Image (cartoon, rainbow, N blue to C red):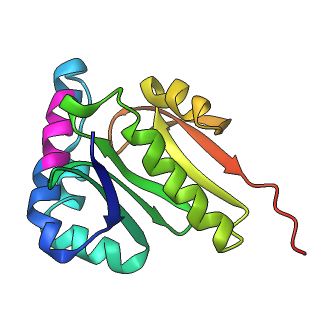
Amino acid sequence: MALNIRLFSTNNAKELSKMIFLVINELEKENPTLVYQLVRDEDQPDELIKAAEKGKMWVAFENNIIVGTLSLEDKRLRRFFVHPNYQRQGIGRKLINIVIQHIKKNYIMEIWVGAIMSAVPIYEKLGFKKVRQFFNKEINQDEMEMKFSLNLKKN
């Protein structure tokens, strides 16, 4: 696999939005009670461009096809999606590792994520710790607030 991860470009907005919607549709098939309208609104191409201006957004490509994305806004992970056909191939871990490199370089001591319950084991494998469980009214389900902390020593 020739995976290339780079920062979001406005040229990728439409294709990235389509990939995110594909992942959301798969999630809804698995659990039809989930409400993802808010996510759909946030991940329209114009909204992705605005979000990329607020923080950092990385996009993973394989042979010029978008296969994953992850963004960091105000020390919070957002938009962590991997194309269904490319899941369980280490793309998510590579995206997280890019974020970890970024936070180390910028001396950001911790980052947070609100994880759907089915994703908690994935985040735990990536080094995140559970903080608290809460009900997210926007998507009508429980989530787990999770934190990743760095132990950096400045010389």
Q: Position of residue 91 (x, y in %)?
A: 37, 40
Q: Position of residue 135 (x, y in %)?
A: 48, 35
Instruction: Name the dominant secondary structure of the magenta segment.
Output: helix
Quadrant, the C terminus:
bottom right
Q: Is residue 70 above or below residue 84?
A: below
Residues shaded magenta: 19-26
Q: Is residue 62 left or right of residue 117?
A: left
Q: Which residue is nearer to you in this view: 116 or 37?
A: 116
Quadrant, the N terminus:
top left
Q: Is residue 84 above or below residue 63?
A: above
Residue ID at (32%, 71%):
51
Residue ID at (10%, 51%):
18
Q: Position of residue 95 (x, y in %)?
A: 43, 50
Q: Is residue 72 above or below residue 127?
A: below
Residue ID at (48%, 38%):
115
Q: Position of residue 117 (x, y in %)?
A: 47, 26
Residue 22 falls in which quadrant of the image? top left
Q: Is residue 11 left or right of residue 152?
A: left
Q: Which residue is nearer to you in this view: 73 or 64?
A: 64
Q: How many marks?
A: 0
Residue 21 falls in which quadrant of the image? top left
Q: Is residue 17 above or below residue 32?
A: below
